[in-house]
Amino acid sequence: MDDIQKKTKENIIKESENNIAISSITFNRTWVFWESYTAKEQNLSYEESNKSIFEWNDIITFFQFWNIYPGNDAKNIFFNGNRIIYYFEEKYRINAMNVFVKGIKPMWEDEQNNGGKYLQLEYQIKLDDTEKFAKVSSFSWKKLILNTMGENYPGSDHVNGIRFVDKTHFERGKIIMFRIEIWVDKFIENEKLNELKNYMIQEMGCEVIEIKDIKVDINKENKKKGKK
């Protein structure tokens, strides 16, 4: 894989009339793709319910992964209008795709998330619109990933990670719902946070957006886990 990545970069640079610089295809930070799971018949621990899948710090490596990952089309892993899909022998459902900075886990208890905020965009979908939403949201999700990695929008240098979550459930009536979440660190200023909010409303086509605090008593959580 390393040889393939190296040769691909070399070919692009050699073949380009503009002689693309390495800095134009690498990112300021390394990113990790995570899947989040729920189980059909059991409660999962954090370690069981979240798994890091791949990491990268340049655009070529990202697309080498993304082009073969089934979730590049949301209907392949999320509710597709007909069924909820379960994977593996354990019957796990993939209920979220996460892209976070390397070293930061998609969990509130992570010290780099604690004290920050997250912006939540919510989409409640009619059954007949599920397929159309999957197509549009897949495009928007990829665009958000690219702009987050490239730090191309207001406050993006404060973003720890982003999530695309399938909140569809049938326990209390059929609710078809999806969320986009943008997790930011505790150092972002309110003015920049509002700029980020307005950008997301415009780009993601959602009228419902909330800004919520991420607050966890880490000492309390560690005691629960038996840590000192």
Image: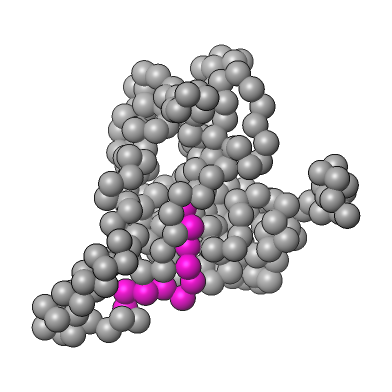
Seen at 64% across and 22% down, the residue is: 42
Find out whether residue 25 is within the magenta segment: yes
- Nearer to the camera, 85 or 206: 85
Magenta stretch, residue numbers: 24-33
Horizontal side of 110 relative to 225 (left or right) equals left
Residue 129 drawn at (x, y percent)? 35, 27
Residue 184 drawn at (x, y percent)? 61, 61
Q: Main secondary structure of the magenta part?
A: strand
Q: Quadrant of the N terminus?
A: bottom left
Residue 161 drawn at (x, y percent)? 54, 58
Residue 90 lies, with reference to residue 163, above or below; the image says above
Count of residue discs: 0
- Nearer to the camera, 1 or 162: 1
Residue 179 visible at all? no
Residue 97 drawn at (x, y percent)? 47, 44
Seen at 40% across and 19% down, the residue is: 83
Q: Quadrant of the C terminus?
A: bottom right
Residue 101 visible at all? yes
Horizontal side of 131 relative to 192 (left or right) equals left
Residue 25 lies, with reference to residue 21, above or below; the image says above
Seen at 20% across and 77% down, the residue is: 10
Find out whether residue 55 is within the magenta segment: no
Residue 60 lies, with reference to residue 18, above or below; the image says above
Seen at 36% across and 18% down, the residue is: 82
What colour scheme governs how the chains and residues are painted in the rendered image of this protein?
one colour
